[in-house]
Image (spheres, rainbow, N blue to C red):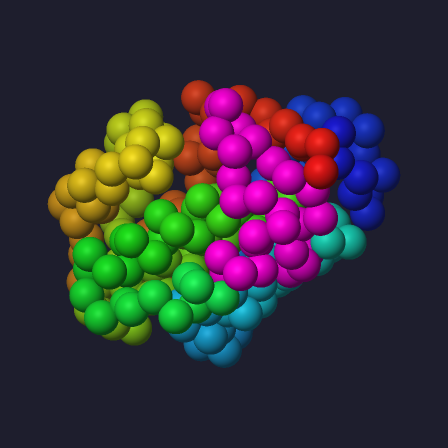
Amino acid sequence: MIKNKLNITNQVELNKTEEKISKQKAKQLFDSGDIDRVEVGTFAGLSFIHKYLFEDIYDFAGQMRTVNLAKDNFRFAPLMYLEQSLQYIDKMPQNNFDEIIEKYVEMNIAHPFREGDGRSTRIWLDIILKSTIHQVIDWNKVDKDDYLLAMKRSPIKDIEIKVLLKNSLTHEINNRDLFMMSIDASYYYEGYAEYKTLEL
């Protein structure tokens, strides 16, 4: 159970409250135009998004995690190499679709935050796509089970996630409903185990 500003001690209640608040904040991010302030394709930009979505829930919003994490027997970037990994990701090219997805996969492996990475990183991804190729993902077209499976396999082989997301591109880059689909709960709760913290 993660310590939170709302002093919620039940995981199910926390999940529901977190989803409700983060969706409200995502709408605000989009409607206010603050989304245009996000630095494109950098950890600083991702940190801005994460803080925006979760600052009312967690003290660590926007801050790099301080624990080692694993999920579904996959270990994310070790804490001792996390900052170095993020500097590497910042420098990765993002000139076309393939490069952008490769960068997205690397950020998922880095998993810089204690909680809320998936939602923040999907928004971050759409901002890069919008800026670079003037398209975004229509998440309504992305099968959730296929997505979760492809993301789990992506550290070894990223072709699956590339094909899945490429087939779901749309030119509706200013559609708020599509934007909001990127943080739909079913993309991170269903079929996903809880995080495990590992000894440093």
Which corner quadrant of the image does residue 47 belong to? bottom right
Taking the spot 46% from the left edge, 75% from the top edge, the residue there is: 39
Looking at the picture, how far across and down is residue 54, in whole percent?
65, 53
Q: Which is nearer the eye, 89 or 50? A: 89
Residue 77, magenta (yes or no): yes
Taking the spot 81% from the left edge, 29% from the top edge, the residue there is: 9
Image side of residue 117 versus residue 149, left or right:
right
Q: Does 123 appear above or below 10? A: below
Q: Which contiguous range is marked in magenta?
A: 61-86
Q: In which quarter of the image is the C terminus?
A: top right
Q: Which is nearer the eye, 157 or 27? A: 157
Q: Does 195 appear above or below 67? A: above
Taking the spot 49% from the left edge, 49% from the top edge, the residue there is: 110
Which corner quadrant of the image does residue 83 belong to? bottom right
Looking at the picture, how far across and down is residue 105, in whole percent?
36, 48
Q: Which is nearer the eye, 160 or 145? A: 160
Residue 124 appears in the picture as rendered: yes
Taking the spot 43% from the left edge, 64% from the top edge, the residue there is: 88
Residue 88, magenta (yes or no): no
Q: In which quarter of the image is the N terminus?
A: top right
Looking at the picture, how far across and down is residue 168, in whole percent?
19, 46
